[in-house]
Image: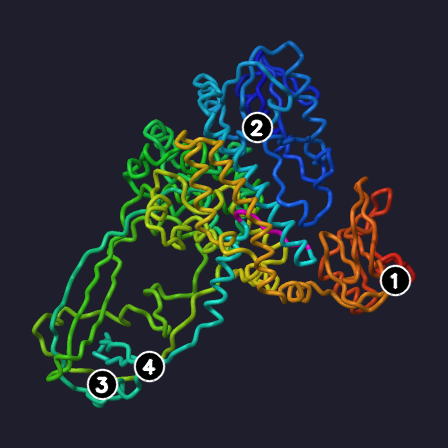
Amino acid sequence: MRLIIAEKHSVARAIAQAIGGGTEQDGHIRCKDNIVTWAQGHLVDLMPPDEYQDGRWKRWDLASLPIDPHPGWRWKLSSADGAARQYRIIDRLIHSGQCDSIVNACDPDREGEAIFRRIVMHAHADCPVMRLWAPSLEGHAIRQALDSMKPASDYRGLADAADLRAKADWLIGMNATRAYSVLAGIHMSVGRVQTPTLWMVVDRDDRISRHVSEPYWIVRIPMGGWTLTGPRHTDRSDADTLANLFADGGEPVNIVDVEHTKRHEKPPRLYDLTALQQDMNSRYGMPASRTLDALQHLYENKLATYPRTDSRYITGADLDTLNRLLNGNWRVNGFINPEARTANPRAQLVVDDSKVAGHTAILPTENVNADILGALEDGERLVLIRIVARMWESVAEDAIHHIIRVTAHPAGHEDVLLTATMDTTVAQGWKAIGQQHEKSDGGNGGGRADDDGHSGMTDGFIPDAVVAGAVITTAGAAEIHEGSTKPPKPFTEASLLSAMEHASRYLEDKDLKAALDDDTSHSGGIGTPATRAGIIEQLLSNGYLERGGKTITSTSKGRILIDMVAPMHRDPATTARMEQALNQVEHGQLDPMQVLDQFRMEAARIPRQAQEIFRGNPDIASRLRATEEYGGCPKCGNPVIKRGKTWQCSTNRRSRDNSGTWTNTAGCGWTLWPVIAGRNLTDANVRSLLSEERIRLTGFRSKTGKKFSADLVADPERGAVLDFSGRRR
C-alpha cells in the first residue's frame, strides 16, 4: 500500500480521481492500492521563542538576545484550526503498518517540500519516499507524473533550501523584531524580506518629495500636417531665439536626413506568476494577492497549470500539449479577438528547456473553454481570459511598425537641430489578439507622452516629398511649449513587484548584479513568486505602507522604521545575496550548514547594531510613539498607543513572569482588546471611539452566532463596552 500526502484536500481529490475509484473517509481517500491524504498548508512550524521549555526567551528584553536555538531547533504543530487533527490522521496512517512507501505530492516548489518534510520528520517516518512532480492537476498529467516519480533524495537540495529559508527568517525576524521593539517601546516588525521591500518604497517616496521641478521650453514648428520640434531649452531666452527664426509662415527649412526603418515588435513571453500579477494590477487594478488567490483556485479546479512559477517558457516535452491547446476554437471565442488569431502559431517561440528549472510558464489546461467562464468569480474569469490571451499572443506574428525619422535645420543655422518622428503601425500582429477585453486608456492610439505631456509622434503624416536635401517652407509661426521636469512616479503594486523581482537594479556589486540578472540561475530578486504578494500585504496590514488608488506609498511609521534599522537590514542586496545562497544550496552548490552559520552570525550582530542606532538617534522612540497615538486614554488622558494587537495607555508597562503570565508593573492599566463580541476592531474604529467616545458598529456576534449591531462606548475600567440603549427596533 502506498501513502500519498498532498498539500490540500482539493489536490488529494484530484490525485484520487486520476488514479481511479476510491472512497473518502476520515481525512483520507482509499483508492486501489493507495491511501491519499492531505495537509492544510503547514501542519508543523518552528516553535516560537517563548515556548522553549527552559523559559529563557519568554521575556522581551535585550539581556535575552541574541536568540539562537541551534543545534536544538524545536518544532510544534500549527495552531491553525484543524491542523493538529489532520496531522494526527497522517501520523496514524504512517504508523498503521499498511503503507510500505510514501509519496510527497505536496506542491512542487520550496514551500511544498517544506510542508511534506516537516510532517514526515515530526512523525519519525522511516518508509521509502518518492516525489510526485505534476505540472497540472489534469488526470493525464498526474498519471504521467506518478509513472515518472523520482526518489525524494533527488530533491534533497530543495528540502535543505526550504529548511534554511525558514530558519533564516526565524533568526533574523525574531532577533530584529525583539531588539527594535524593546528599544522603541512599541512593537515593530522587522523581516529579512519585508524590510528591504519597505526601503524601496521609502526611497522612492523620498526621491519624489525631494524633487525640485525645473522648467524647460520646446519650440514646435508647424509644417502642414506634421511638426518639427527643436531641442529642449532650460533657458527661455534660447527658446525665444529659435522661435523668432520662425515668427512667420513660409520660412525655409533644410532637410538633412530622412530615415525609414521597419521595426518588428516581438510577441511577449508567456506568464510567470510575477508577470501575471503585474499585468492584472496594471490593467485592472487587481492586488497581487487576489491574482494569486484566483490563479490558485483555477489550478485546483484544473483550469490552469501550477501558479507559483518563475519561468516564462515551456520545455520541448510540453510542445505537444501547447499545440493541442492552440488547436480548434475551444479557447478562442470568449477569450480573444477571433479575427486576430494567427493562422500559423509559432509555438517554438516559447520553448527553451534551459530556462525551465522546475515549473513551466502558466498555461490554461485542456479543460478550458468559453462555457466555463460564466461559472467563475469575476477575478478568476479575468485572470483566466488573460492567461489564454497571453498564450495566443506569445505565438502570434510580430507587430510591425514603419518609422520615419526626419532631421532638419533652419536655413542658415546648421548648428540648430530640428527633428520629427512618425510611427505607423503596418501590422498589429500579437497586439490585436486581446483587444476585445482591454480597457480603453482614453488615448488616440498615439505614442507615449513626453514629460511635457505632448506625444512623441507627429500629429499627422510626413509626406513623401520630405526627402534628404529638400528645402521645405514652414506652414505657420512657431509655438513655444513650456514643460517642467517630473519626479519619479510612485510605486504601484505592479511596479513594486517588478522592483522586488529585479533587485539587481539596486546593487553596485557587478558580480552579484550579473548573477541576479542571469535567467538561468532563477536567483534574482528578493522574495519568491510565491511570497511577494504576501510580503506587500503584510507591510500594508502592519501600517508601514498604504494604498491610494493604484499607488502604494510609505507611511510615517514605515519611514521611521527604515530610519532606525541597520543599513544592511534594509538593503535589498543583503536579501538578494541570501536568496542567491538558498538557490545555490538548492542546486547543490553550497553546503547548507555553512549557509546556516552565516545566517546565525548575522542574527547575533543584530542586538548590538540596534543599540548603536538608538544611541546615535535618541529621538527615534518618541517619533515612533507619535505615529502610534490613537487618542486620549479614557482613564488618565495620556496618549493611547498600539502594542502588538491591543490598544493601551502609553503609560502602561508590563512584564512576563516565569509562568508566562503578563502583569502590569506601571501606568493606569487601560487596555482595549482587539476582538469584542466576535468582531475585530480596526485602527479606524479605535480612533473614532477615542475621539467621539461612542460609535455605532455592526458585525457583532452573540453566543449563538447571531449577528447584531450596537454602540461601542469607551470605558475607563473595561476598555470598551457594548451599549444597546440606542439600538433601533
**Sequence-earlier tag: 1 or 3:** 3
Q: Describe the element under mark 4 as helix, strand or loop.
A: strand
Residue under numbered circle 3: 242
Q: Describe the element under mark 2 as helix, strand or loop.
A: helix
- Mark 2 vs mark 4, CA separation in Å: 61 Å
Establish if 692 lies above or below 338: below
Q: Residues within 10 Å of mark 3 (few under 14, many from 20)?
A: many
What secondary structure is the magenta-colored segment mainly? loop
Identity of the residue drawn at 28% across and 72% down: 459
**Is residue 547 among the parts visible in the rendering?**
no
**Sequence-earlier tag: 1 or 4:** 4
Q: Which residues are magenta?
A: 187-193
Q: Position of residue 603 (x, y in %)?
A: 56, 44
Q: Nearer the viewer, residue 360 or 260?
A: 360
Q: Which mark is residue 481?
A: 4
Which one is closest to the eye, mark 1 or mark 4?
A: 1
Q: Position of residue 554 (x, y in %)?
A: 56, 62
Residue under numbered circle 1: 716
For badge 3, the amino acid type reads Leu
- Mark 1 vs mark 4, CA separation in Å: 63 Å
- Mark 4 vs mark 3, CA separation in Å: 12 Å
